[in-house]
Image (spheres, grey):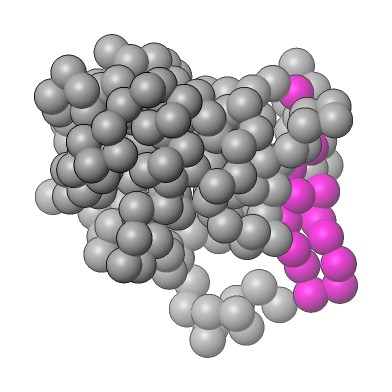
Amino acid sequence: MWLQATDGRRGYVASCQTMFDLSTDWYSGRLDENWEPPTPEKAVAIFARHGLTGDFWRLS
Amino acid sequence: MTPFDRQVRAQLYRLFSEGTTVVDEVAIAESRGWSTDDVEDSLERLAETHLVKLAEGGHRVEMAHPFSGAGTGYRSVVGDRSWNANCAWDALAILAIMGDGEAVAPGPDGDVVWSVQDGKVSPEGVVHLLIPARRFWDDIEFT
């Protein structure tokens, strides 16, 4: 049913637990003044720590 | 980021986390005694580097991930506090920042609610991401 909302296009399907766990990592320190956005290399490494690899998750 | 941009970014996140729903140049400036013009300039720089998304034609912060400045139907609830989120992922992500609670996503037959307790999400569910990571910001609202 959810594919009807995207005209049948399928992207990446991740479990809610995976996305929550990624978020604890991805948004760590986000409210702090000294927070720095992750470099592309660091971002890809964060994705990979949570099993998010492959073409969908590459940044270059 | 300039030192001032860092302060503005942190302040707008502080306002969102405290439950402010309209976070714009006035709210940010007044909360810290800054010049509205200076805050506008800073917000434009933050938007250019994709650290926030501003509403079209103004300086209201529409997205400061995972927080949303608009009522999208996606939201997060912790006790008697709630926040607007941009998508299902962000509804979960707000809980990762703010603590255990419920992530709510609109569905065709009503709201879908996930509970997070001690870092565990229940019931099991999935999030569908249509746009690849390298293109998230091509059209961030669609993403």
Q: Where B132 falls versus A34 (above or below)?
A: below
Which x, y percent locates residue B28? 42, 33
Query: Which residue shows up at 60% across the image and 37% down it?
Result: B20
Query: Quick check: B11 left or right of A18?
Result: left
Q: Is residue B124 something one can see in this rendering?
A: no
| Magenta stretch, main secondary structure class | strand
Which x, y percent locates residue B48? 17, 50
Which x, y percent locates residue B113? 82, 48
Q: Is residue B77 something one can see in this rendering?
A: yes
The boundaries of the magenta stretch are B100-113
As for residue B108 lying within the magenta part, the answer is yes
- Point out the image quarter for the N terminus of chain B: top left
- Point out the image quarter for the C terminus of chain B: bottom left
Q: Where B140 falls versus B69 (above or below)?
A: below
Depth order, front residue of B37/B49: B37
Query: Quick check: A52 left or right of B76?
Result: left
Query: Which residue shows up at 21% across the image and 36% down it?
Result: B38
Depth order, front residue of B19/A28: B19
Query: Which residue shows up at 28% across the image and 13% down it?
Result: A34
Quarter of the image where one finds residue A44: top left
Depth order, front residue of B42/B100: B42
